[in-house]
Image (cartoon, grey):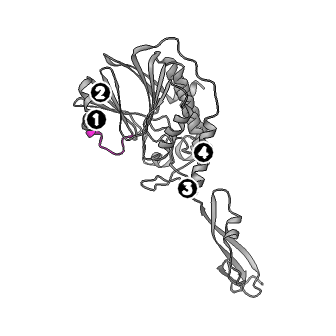
Amino acid sequence: MDGHPSGAGIHGAQAMTGKPVGRGELEGDAPDGYRIKGRSTLYDTRTGDPLVEWVKTDAKQPTPEEWAERFKQAVELACIEAPRSRRPRSTAEDLRVVYPMGDPHIGMYAWRGETGEDFDLDIAVRDLRAAMRLLVDRAPASRVGHVLNMGDYFHADNASNRTARSGHALDVDSRYLKVQVAGLACMVSLVDAALTKHEFVEVTNCTGNHDDHTSMHLSIALSQRYHDEPRVKVHAPSAYNYYEHGGCLYGATHGDTCKHSELAEVMAHDAAEQWGRTRYRHWYVGHVHHDSVKERRGVTVETIRTLAARDAWHHSAGYRSGRDMKCDVWHAVHGRIARNIVGIEQVRASL
């Protein structure tokens, strides 16, 4: 070949040679998690010799059997035998402490140069654990502590790194299985921290728009992790969840499937008997990442902040809400009597 443009041409993988490319050849050089869907080769049109080859790849979707095996590995890693948390010496029967978590988005990635702050898998887990430690230290030793995850605990629901409902592309840090294992281990550490202060710990994982399926997986894995621990109860995941404590009734939902102005009616319908028995009623809502409180007829509807940083989309859209985590103290007779808040700066200062 003399370098003249007419001396070369782009053809398919079997052009010029007539040799078909088998499936094994296509997949043989693919990096982990990808498959080769085709090759394009530049040949010398005079000699027929290949000059340059382009390998076309896309994400390889695991088979159902591969998904099952990955989930099994994650559960096995999380269920490694560990010493039980120490039991508190005494607890108050009339108190219940709730630890609401607004949209942790574990596995989300943000780059400082684009969003003003770095955020990744390690940072998300570190911040959550530190915030929980601070809140548990401040909480009274109530008989029941409730770890209340209000959805979008995981940033991505599968390895495609897109939301399942809308197909929006997501900025994700690390491999899907690694995120699942780290997120499960983080939740175990949060429950174990609560066990040091409360006689019994309840766990709820609301279904979010980012983790329709992984919220279920998380609850299943936690149920297996604590299957022989009578002090822990993992509730089945649901879009709407209700809990009664004396004269108090509180609900939890992610907040993406119903207008917040209609949540009072939803609670009155779904939990009619509990509504009739109680005086203080409250909704914990996630999804919007900012604080707001609306007092409706018979119930207060509150949206909760997140500890997570903004991803590129939210940063460019102008979202600038504060970041914190809270715990509420509910009295069986007097309703919510106290709240502790740890902001992101305080969380980072404690590390």
> Badge 1 is on which residue?
267
Q: CA distance from mark 2 to mark 1?
A: 9 Å
Point out the image quarter for the C terminus: top right
x then y, percent, for residue 67: 57, 52
> Badge 2 is on which residue?
281
- Name the disc covering residue 72, or none: 4
Q: Specify start and end residues of the magenta stretch as a single range.
A: 254-263
| Residue at position x 61%, y 36% in the image | 78
- In terms of depth relative to the viewer, which is nearer, 161 or 291? 161
- Rate crowding at label 2 as few (under 14), some (14 to 19) or many (20 or more) other CA atoms within 10 Å: many
> Badge 3 is on which residue?
64
- The reply to whether callout 3 and callout 4 are in contact (CB within 8 Å) is no
- In terms of depth relative to the viewer, which is nearer, 1 or 74? 74
Q: Amino acid at mark 2?
A: Arg
x then y, percent, for residue 36: 64, 66
User: Viewed as shown, does residue 4 lie left or right of 278?
Assistant: right
Q: Is residue 81 above or below residue 57?
A: above
Q: Amino acid at mark 1?
A: Met
Judge whether residue 347 can be spotted in this image. Answer: no
x then y, percent, for residue 116: 54, 42
Q: CA distance from mark 3 to mark 1?
A: 37 Å
Q: Is residue 338 above or below residue 253?
A: above
Sequence-wise first label, 3 or 1? 3
Sequence-wise first label, 4 or 1? 4
| Residue at position x 28%, y 35% in the image | 267
